[in-house]
Amino acid sequence: MPKKTKTTCKINGAYVVTVDMGYGHQRAVYPLKDIAACPPGMIGTDIISANTYAGIPKSDRRAWEGSRRLYETISRLKNLPLVGQKIFDLMDYFQRIEPFYPRRDLSHPIMQLKQIYRMIGKGWGRHLVETLNQDPKPLITSFFATAFFAEEHGYKSDIYCICTDTDISRAWAPLSPQKSRIHYFAPNNRVKQRLLSYGVKEKNIFVTGFPLPKENIGGPDLDVLKKSLGCRIGMLDPTGRYQKKYQHTLEYYLGAKYCGIKAKRPITLTFAVGGAGAQKDVGAAILESLHTHIDRGDLQLNLIAGSRNDVFRYYEDVVNRLHIQKKHRGNVSIIYHEDKLAYFHLFNKTLLTTDILWTKPSELSFYTGLGLPIIMAPTIGSQEEFNRSWLHSVGAGFEQENPRYTHEWLFDWLQTGWLAEAAMKGFMDAPRNGAYHIEDIVLHHKQSEIEDMHLL
C-alpha cells in the first residue's frame, strides 16, 4: 500500500478547502493541490477539510458529522425492500433541482439554505475562518456551505466556489445572491445559467469546466492525454472500423504519432463505486460475468474500492470465491487506500491505462473529457440525473445493460466501434482544463474561461 500523499504547500498560493463527504467535493480540489497554501497553525496541511481539520471545535464537528452519516446511511438504504427508496426519495426531494424551463426567477431561498444560514448564525464555521484570517489568501472551496460561512464570518480575501455537477440546486447560491461577493467556477454553461436564475451576479461566474487531474493531461500539449487516448482508441476499435472511417479526424485532433498505437495489454475496464459504497454489488456481478475472460488473460478489470475498507474486503472475498486463476490474478486489481487523496492518486494512475470507465454519473461524468467512454450505473440523487443527461448530450455515455451478461453485450459494443467514438466525443466536446483556468483566475487574475461554451 502506498504512503499518504506528501504535502506541497505554497507560500503564495491559495487556501484550498473541501469537505470529507463522499468523493465529489474532494476530487474536485485534488487537481489544485500544487497551489494549496498551508494555513496558520496547520503545518503539513495542504488541502483543508472543513469538517475534519486539526483543531475543529466539537460543535462544528458534530454538525458536519450528522449530515455526512445521514447521507451515507440513506444512500446505502436505497436498495432496502419496500421502504429504502421512499426514504431516499424524501431526502432527495429537499435537495431537488427544479426544471430549467420555463425560464423564471428562482432566487427565493429554499428550506435547506435557510437551515444552513441559521447554523452559520450560531457560529458554525467561525473558527476556521478566524484561523485563515490570520494570514488571508484567496480561498477556493468545493462546497457551498464553506463559501457561505467564509462570507458571513468576514473572510478577508477573495472567496471562490467550485460547482461539482452539471446542474445545481438553489442551495449552491447564497441567501442574498445580489449582495454576495462569492465567485463561482461553473463546469458548464448550464450551471452558469442556473446561478443567474438564482440571482448570482454574472460578473461573479466563470465557466471553467470541472478541474481534472493534471497528471492525466500532460500540460498544454496534452502529451499524456493524447498517448493514453491513442492507445485507448486501438483497444476500443478492434476491427479498425472507426479508425478507418475517421482517420482524418483522429490525425487532426490527436496527431499522426498518437494514431494506430498497438498497446501491449488487454482491454481494460474500470468500475468505480461511490463514496457510500452503495453499488459494490454491481462490481461483483461484472467480475462474475467476465471472470472467464480474465482467466484467459484477455481482459483487465479494475475494481475501485476507494477509501472504504469494507468495499475492499468485499471485493477480495468475491475474487477468492470465484477462484480467479493465480497466473491471471494480476488482471484483477482492487484500487484502495484509506487516505482519500492517496486514493485519488492511485485512481488517476489507473485511468491512464483504462479503456472504459463504468460508474454512476457522479462528478466522474466530467472525466469523459480525458477521452474516456462511460458506462453509466443507475443514478443516486437528482443531480446525477442531470449528469446522466449531460453525458448523453455529449455522446460519451451509455446506459449499462444487465451486469450479469456483461460478457455478451460489452464485446458486441466493442465490435461496433461505438465506444471508440464515445471516447473521441468526450475528448473533443467535454472540458478538460478546469484546473488551469481556475489557477489563472485565482493566482494571476486573468479572465480564463472555456471557449465554445455553446457545446456544453
Image (tube, rainbow, N blue to C red):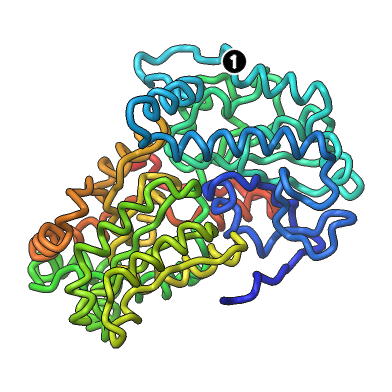
Q: Classify the position of the N terminus by image quarter.
A: bottom right
Other-residue count near label 1 (Cα within 10 Å), few / some / many at <14 / 14–19 / ≥20: few
The residue sitting at 62% across, 33% down in the picture is 67
Give residue 424's quadrant in the image: bottom left
Specify whether residue 454 is in view.
no
- What percent of the width, then of the height, locates residue 264? 26, 86
Measured from the top left, where is residue 291 in percent x and y? 22, 70
- Could you tell whether 276 is left or right of 382 in the image? right
Of the pair 325 and 283, the residue shown nearer to us: 325
- Taking the image as shown, residue 36 lies to the left or right of residue 91, namely right
Residue 237: image location, x then y, percent? 15, 69
Q: Is residue 182 above or below residue 293?
A: above
Left/right of residue 103 with respect to residue 326 in the rendered view: right
Give SS at disc 1.
helix
38 vs 430, left or right, is right
Where, quadrant-wise, is the C terminus in this rendering?
Answer: top left
Picture layout, residue 358 above or below residue 454: below
Q: How many marks?
A: 1
Q: Residue furthest front?
A: 321
| Residue 31 found in image quarter | bottom right
Residue at coordinates 80% horizontally, 41% vertically from top-left? 157
Answer above or below: position of 57 versus 411.
Answer: above
Comparing 232 with 340, the one in front is 340
Q: At label 1, which amino acid type do we have?
A: Met
Residue visible at 78% across and 36% down in the picture = 60
Report which quarter residue 278 is drawn in: top left
Q: Residue at x 31, y 59 (%)?
A: 284
Q: Is residue 307 visible?
A: yes
Q: Which residue is mark 1?
A: 111
Depth check: give the residue in front, 446 or 199: 199
* Percent x, y of residue 96: 45, 23
